[in-house]
């Protein structure tokens, strides 16, 4: 037998009556945005100071100015101002701005991934970089530029022999070889000034690892020394230092997290320091391993979203505007 179907109509939904809703005067409410927070149009020909002062006092408009203030504070306190840079930052033409900030004392050390040395070297050597990957991949020509593979690997081998880290080895090679455009090289600039420039390599990720000149023992020795140098700088961040992760979504955030735990394991107190992640996409590792975990309860973390070629010049302007 089939079950009996009830023909009783279900009770209609009952909407809430609104007549008894409690309200309050708008003036009594605490609000997040006020007239003083709004952006102001600046006239043509306005100074960069006027432009920055006219930004809305909300979200990234506040974060940009606050981060710039922390960088200036770190310089005043003579604490490390470390810039971790994805290779894209160099590839889109920002090295000259970072060299300038280095000259002014707002960059005391740089950390690169392995691809960073490729763009840094090629710009210094021939004045151009960034090949069309798809065009060379089909024929097997991708990454096979002779000078890039041979000279960078020779620099690494020579540097490891002389007890240098990978960044210093490449910076020395660019400077002492008197490459034509060495003035735009971050690594050469750091070498000339005696500042730490470290390179953190994942083996197999960079085109120079495909060349017969690659010496994996020298590569590993040099990049491990750079990790220890970088960790030594991270250990000194307390008391006003700043670490900025610009454009590295995985490798450098992982390196930074390990450097933080190593420094604390060895008894270095990391308190009162600032971290920031600048990228055109906010990813898990930079925000977790750079902005949030290391600073929890002991520092400040910032996240700024935008294209490197726009955001970094804007941050530089904000840093310098407040120093006048």
Image (cartoon, grey):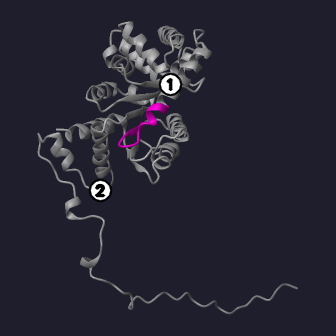
Label 2 crowd (10 A; few <14 / some 14-19 / many >=20)? some
Residue for point 29% across, 56% down: 58
Q: Which mark is residue 226?
A: 1
Q: How far apart in space, not on screen, are marks 2 and 1 (Cα)?
A: 39 Å
Residue placed under numbered mark 2 in the picture = 58
State whether residue 179 appears in this view.
yes
Closer to the chain start, of discs 2 and 1, is 2
Q: Position of residue 189 (x, y in %)?
A: 34, 19
Q: Where is residue 137 drawn, in percent x and y? A: 56, 20
Q: Nearer the viewer, residue 50 or 169?
A: 169
Image height check: is 94 above or below 235?
above
Q: Is residue 233 left or right of residue 75?
A: right
Q: In the image, which residues are magenta?
A: 231-246
Whether 206 is drawn above or below 311: the answer is above
Picture quarter with the C terminus: top left
> In the shown orientation, is residue 298 left or right of residue 42?
right
Residue 306 included in the magenta stretch of the image: no
Query: Nearer the viewer's eye, disc 2 or disc 1?
Result: 1
Q: Residue at x 58, y 19 (%)?
A: 221
Q: Residues within 10 Å of mark 1 (few under 14, many from 20)?
A: many
Q: Residue 275 in the image: x percent, y percent? A: 41, 43
């Amino acid at each position: 037998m089939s079950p009996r179907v009830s023909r009783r109509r279900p009770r209609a939904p009952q909407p809430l009556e609104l007549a008894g809703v409690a309200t309050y005067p708008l003036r009594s409410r605490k609000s997040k945005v006020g007239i003083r927070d709004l952006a102001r149009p600046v006239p043509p020909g306005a100074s960069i100071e006027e432009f920055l002062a006219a930004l809305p006092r909300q979200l990234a408009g506040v974060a940009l100015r606050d981060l710039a203030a922390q960088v200036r504070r770190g310089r005043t306190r003579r604490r490390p101002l470390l810039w971790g840079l994805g290779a894209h930052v160099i590839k889109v033409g920002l090295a000259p701005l970072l060299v300038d900030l280095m000259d002014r004392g707002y960059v005391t050390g740089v950390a690169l991934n392995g691809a960073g040395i490729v763009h840094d070297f090629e710009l210094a050597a021939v004045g151009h970089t960034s090949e069309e990957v798809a065009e060379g991949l089909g024929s097997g020509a991708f990454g096979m530029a002779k000078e890039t593979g041979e000279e960078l690997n020779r620099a690494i081998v020579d540097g490891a022999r002389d007890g240098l880290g990978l960044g210093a080895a490449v910076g020395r090679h660019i400077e002492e070889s008197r490459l034509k455009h060495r003035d735009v090289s971050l690594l050469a600039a750091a070498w000339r000034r005696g500042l730490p420039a470290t390179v953190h390599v994942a083996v197999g990720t960079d085109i120079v690892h495909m060349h017969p000149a690659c010496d994996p023992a020298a590569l590993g020795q040099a990049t491990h020394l750079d990790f220890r140098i970088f960790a030594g700088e991270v250990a000194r961040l307390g008391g006003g230092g700043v670490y900025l992760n610009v454009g590295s979504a995985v490798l450098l955030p992982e390196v930074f997290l390990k450097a933080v735990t190593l420094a604390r394991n060895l008894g270095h107190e990391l308190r009162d320091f600032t971290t920031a992640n600048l990228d055109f996409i906010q990813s898990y590792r930079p925000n977790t391993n750079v902005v949030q975990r290391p600073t929890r309860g002991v520092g400040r973390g910032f996240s700024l979203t935008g294209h490197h070629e726009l955001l970094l010049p804007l941050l530089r302007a904000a840093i310098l505007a407040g120093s006048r």
